Amino acid sequence: MKYQRIEDLRIDADKTQAEIAAVLNCNRNVYRRYEKGIYDIPVWALIKLADYYGVSTDYLLGRTQQRRPYPKN
């Protein structure tokens, strides 16, 4: 599964793959494989990216068009 939204959000934020890989504390090639769907993105990385971009994990996964994250209790 290609994770198009994490690529789109990265480009919209004018960030490189290396910069986002640093946020996730992983190698750029690993991050690139997440974007392209070669590797499934781990849950911890998905949550970290959702927090970084201020969106919901469902938005990153393409399950909703609603970008806003769920309210925290």
Image (spheres, rainbow, N blue to C red):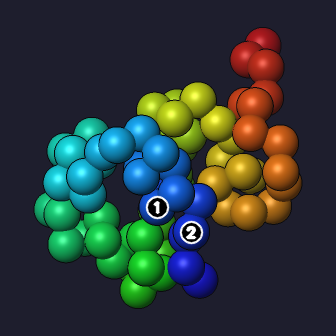
Image quarter of the N terminus: bottom right
Residue 50 point in image, percent of width and height: 56, 40
Q: Which residue is mark 2?
A: 4
Task: Reply above or below: 32 against 8.
Answer: below
The residue depicted at 42 percent of the width and 39 percent of the height is 13
Residue 24, disc: none
The residue depicted at 18 percent of the width and 63 percent of the height is 28
Q: Amino acid at mark 2?
A: Gln
Label 1: which secondary element: helix
Label 2: which secondary element: helix
The residue depicted at 72 percent of the width and 51 percent of the height is 59
Q: Which residue is mark 1?
A: 7
3 sits to left or right of 33:
right
The residue depicted at 43 percent of the width and 79 percent of the height is 36
Image quarter of the C terminus: top right
Residue 32 point in image, percent of width and height: 30, 71
Q: Amino acid at mark 1?
A: Glu
The quarter of the picture where residue 3 lies is bottom right
* Front residue (pair 31, 41): 31
Outermost residue on the top side: it is 73
Q: How would you rate the neighbour count of disc 1 (Cα within 10 Å): few for under 14, some for 14-19, many for 20 or more?
A: some
Q: Are marks 2 and 1 in contact (CB under 8 Å)?
A: yes
